[in-house]
Image (cartoon, rainbow, N blue to C red):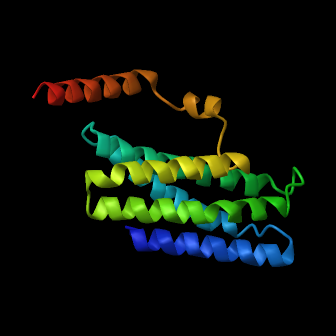
Amino acid sequence: MPTFEDLLGNVARLDEGFAAMQVTGKVDKEIDDTLEQIISFVTRREQFWFQGEPNRRTFTVYHSWRNLRLVFSKMRNRFANAQLVHDNPVVVDQAREIIPKVLSTLASLIAMEKEPTDSEIEPILEHVRELRASARQVDMVQPLSEELKETDQAKLTAALDELLKRMATLGEA
């Protein structure tokens, strides 16, 4: 079973691959394997936290992993299609622009998973907002309309209702 250290190693390997591609000016198809490993790990974390008890911390961690998956998935698609749409080597430069935001989000997220505290919620959400904004500027995240297509509206509504009930109960105490 891959670990957080494996994930960080894969992201570092990804950035090294990007640096090499910047030098050559060409997309290296080998990057797809690294992206697949990253997406697989991130998807498992997203699914794990999706199954968690509905509360603010669980949602924050789930939301963070989900956004990382969306960014890495769009990145993978951009690299796969780079030659077809003449997006080479621009896609490499754009991907490298968001790696620092990815790493900062991952560092906070991993720390929260290892030692959960509610004080980390707002900083992590801020990292995710910054990541999404950067990713949107370089076309490394799907349009919101595409994201919503994969959302099960009934499950989302039920989860939000449960969360609101718990918050109301806490407010009465």
Compared to residue 136, the image places residue 54 above or below, namely: above
Q: Nearer the viewer, residue 119 or 151?
A: 119
Compared to residue 62, the image places residue 169 above or below, namely: above
Q: Give x and y (percent) for residue 103.
A: 53, 65
Q: Nearer the viewer, residue 106 or 167?
A: 167
Using residue 70 as the reference point, say whether residue 88 is left or right of it: right
In this view, the residue farthest toward the left is 173
Q: Give x and y (percent) for residue 77.
A: 70, 51
Does residue 24 appear in this view?
Answer: yes
Using residue 119 as the reference point, say whether residue 85 is left or right of it: right
Does residue 61 appear in this view?
Answer: no
Q: Give x and y (percent) for residue 143.
A: 67, 36
Q: Nearer the viewer, residue 76 or 103?
A: 103
Residue at point 49%, 30% (across, down): 151
Name the quarter where the N terminus is drawn. Answer: bottom left
* Quarter of the view holding residue 97: bottom right
Residue at point 46%, 62% (across, down): 106
Residue at point 31%, 59% (across, down): 113
Q: Give x and y (percent) for residue 93.
A: 77, 64
Residue at point 57%, 28% (across, down): 149
In this view, the residue farthest toward the right is 86
Name the quarter where the C terminus is drawn. Answer: top left
Using residue 105 as the reference point, say whether residue 163 is left or right of it: left
Count of marks overlaid on the render: 0
Compared to residue 64, the image places residue 29 above or below, namely: below
Using residue 17 as the reference point, say whether residue 64 is left or right of it: left
